[in-house]
Amino acid sequence: MWTTASAEVFTWRDADGKVHFSDTPPPGVDAKKIRAGTQPGATSASGAAGRSLAEQDMEFRKRQTEAEKAQTKTEQEKKDTEDSKRNCADAKRQLSALEAGQRMSRLNEAGEVIPLDDQMRAQEIEKTRNSVQSWCK
């Protein structure tokens, strides 16, 4: 049994401009032989569609990469904000302790504990106020 895929197919236009398809063209007509199962111009259309699909895939990957970068940036900004809030709270606590006159000490270069005198306390208060201004925007 013959199938359409193995049959020859011809196409031609009649006097009215209508396109006809048949396995045998009428005599005296300029008919073109085409492969069964394909349409004329299908190869060029699939080539264009393939390029278009590749372009679409490339654009999708680009959008996906941009979305990942945006998400990473958002997460980093959130982390930075949390760090700033924590540093602000720590600086405010330190400033309150210094201004309240609590006993404080620091380590010197030799690793010895030295209690803060009035001059050192004033320097620490100034330094901590700058930290509060920096972190608590």
Image (cartoon, helix red, strand yellow):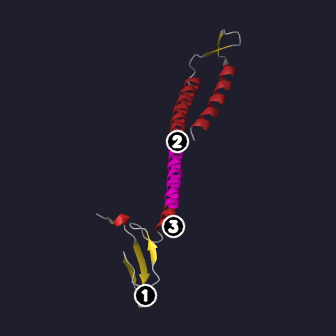
- Which numbered disc, 2 or 1, marks the residue that appears first in the sequence? 1
The amino acid on which the numbered mark 2 sits, given as a three-letter code, is Thr
Q: Between marks 2 and 1, how big is the CA–CA gap? A: 61 Å
Q: Is residue 19 above or below residue 16?
A: above
Disc marking residue 17: 1
Give how far across and how far down residue 40 sits, in percent.
46, 72
Q: Which residues are magenta?
A: 50-75
Q: Position of residue 38 (x, y in %)?
A: 41, 67
Residue 31 lies, with reference to residue 67, above or below; the image says below
Quadrant of residue 94 within the rendered picture: top right
Asked if residue 59 lies in the magenta stretch, the reply is yes
Say which amino acid is labelled 3: Ser
Label 2: few (<14), some or many (≥20) within 10 Å?
few
**Mark 3 surroundings within 10 Å by alpha-carbon count, few (fewer than 14), some (14 through 19), many (20 or more):** few
Which of marks 3 and 2 precedes in the sequence? Answer: 3
Element type at marker 2? helix
**Discs 2, 1 touching: Cβ within 8 Å:** no
The mark found on residue 72 in the picture is 2
- In the rendered image, the quadrant that contains the N terminus is bottom left
Label disc, if present, on residue 44 of the rendered structure: 3
Magenta residues, dominant SS class: helix
- Disc 2 vs disc 1: which is toward the camera? 1
Query: How far apart are labels 3 and 1 at the CA level?
Result: 24 Å
* Residue type, numbered disc 1: Gly
Left or right placement of residue 97 versus residue 21 in this view? right
For marks 3 and 1, the one nearer the N-term is 1
Q: Do the residues under discs 3 and 1 have CB atoms within 8 angstroms?
A: no
Q: Is residue 18 left or right of residue 72?
A: left
Real-space CA distance between mark 2 and mark 3, rounded to the nearest whole angstrom: 42 Å
